[in-house]
Image (cartoon, rainbow, N blue to C red):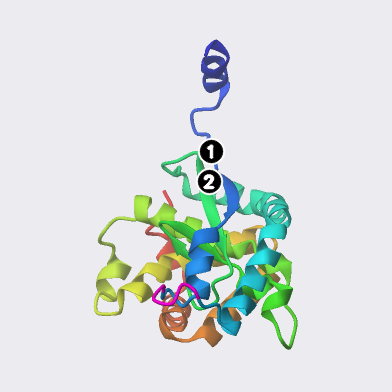
């Protein structure tokens, strides 16, 4: 206890700690997904279920790889987040459940990350996404958590676009932060790939990107930076 007190006293008053992320496999979630979330025929195993379970087997075996990649690629991004925006997360660590459930989106609470597109078994044709882009899957959801704790309920931008879908509004500041942080980390090329991916997704992600491009990143970030 004395050592912990000493460490806290030695830390600068303006220091902000980035949370530690621990990856696990969303086993039960993936099994439900493989059955289409339908347990009415529990004694039958369809071919589609066997296929989806093959994705989960690969995911289970690659958990250490995903963990190592995140630990290596996220440190600079989290450092910039803490330094530039000067607000902590409410927790020092989070457990992130990695899922191979292709139809289900990633989500911040509970923290579930869809990594199906990074699995070789998922692709009957083509190649899995480059693992250099994986860092944005957890980083994106962590930013949702950070914003839910630190962005005011009402800001000029949120009020201006209050008639947009909730999913659109929740991504405007997030995309502005991502754009800034990746550029600051000298990873603008990764941001451009992320940007283009969300545009291709269409829907709320594309609309939020359009608002970001229209309003300009600096104007949006003024509502966040102290």
Is residue 41 found inside the magenta-colored segment of the image?
Answer: yes
* Rendering quarter of residue 155: bottom left
- Residue 41, x across and y down, in percent: 43, 77
Residue 13 versus residue 97: which sits nearer the camera?
97
Tag 2 near tag 1, CB within 8 Å: yes
Q: CA distance from mark 2 to mark 1?
A: 7 Å
Residue 196 versus residue 124: which sits nearer the camera?
124
Which secondary structure type mostly characterizes the magenta part of the structure? Answer: loop
Residue 90 versus residue 46: which sits nearer the camera?
46
- Residue 108, x across and y down, in percent: 44, 59
In this rendering, the count of numbered labels is 2
Which mark is on residue 17? 1
Q: Residue under label 2, please give it.
A: 82
Q: Is residue 95 above or below residue 25?
A: above
Residue 205 versus residue 35: which sits nearer the camera?
35
Task: Tell me the SS state at disc 2.
Answer: helix
- Residue 11, x across and y down, in percent: 56, 25
What segment is highlighted magenta in the picture?
39-43
- Residue at point 52%, 84% (across, down): 201
- Residue at point 59%, 69% (across, down): 100
Task: Tell me the SS state at disc 1.
Answer: loop
- Residue at point 46%, 74% (across, down): 216
User: Would residue 46 be seen by someone viewing this image from the given angle?
Assistant: yes
Badge 2 or badge 1: first in the primary sequence: 1
């Amino acid at each position: 206890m004395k050592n912990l007190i000493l460490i806290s006293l030695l830390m600068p008053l303006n220091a902000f700690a980035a949370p530690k992320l621990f990856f696990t496999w969303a086993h039960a979630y993936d099994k439900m997904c493989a059955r289409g979330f339908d347990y009415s025929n529990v004694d039958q195993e369809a071919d589609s279920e066997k296929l989806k379970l093959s994705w989960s087997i690969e995911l289970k075996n690659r958990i250490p790889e995903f963990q190592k990649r995140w630990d290596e690629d996220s440190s600079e991004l989290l450092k910039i987040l803490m330094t530039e925006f000067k607000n902590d997360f409410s927790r020092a660590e989070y457990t992130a459940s990695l899922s191979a459930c292709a139809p289900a989106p990633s989500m911040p609470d509970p923290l579930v990350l869809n990594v199906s597109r990074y699995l070789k078994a998922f692709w009957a044709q083509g190649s899995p996404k480059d693992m250099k882009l994986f860092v944005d899957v957890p980083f994106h959801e962590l930013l949702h958590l950070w914003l839910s704790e630190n962005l005011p309920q009402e800001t000029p931008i949120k009020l201006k676009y209050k008639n947009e879908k909730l999913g659109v509004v929740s991504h405007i500041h997030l995309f502005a932060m991502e754009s800034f942080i990746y550029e600051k980390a000298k990873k603008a090329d990764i941001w451009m790939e992320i940007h283009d991916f969300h545009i291709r997704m269409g829907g709320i992600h594309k609309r939020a990107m359009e608002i970001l491009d229209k309003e300009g990143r600096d104007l949006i970030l003024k509502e966040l930076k102290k």
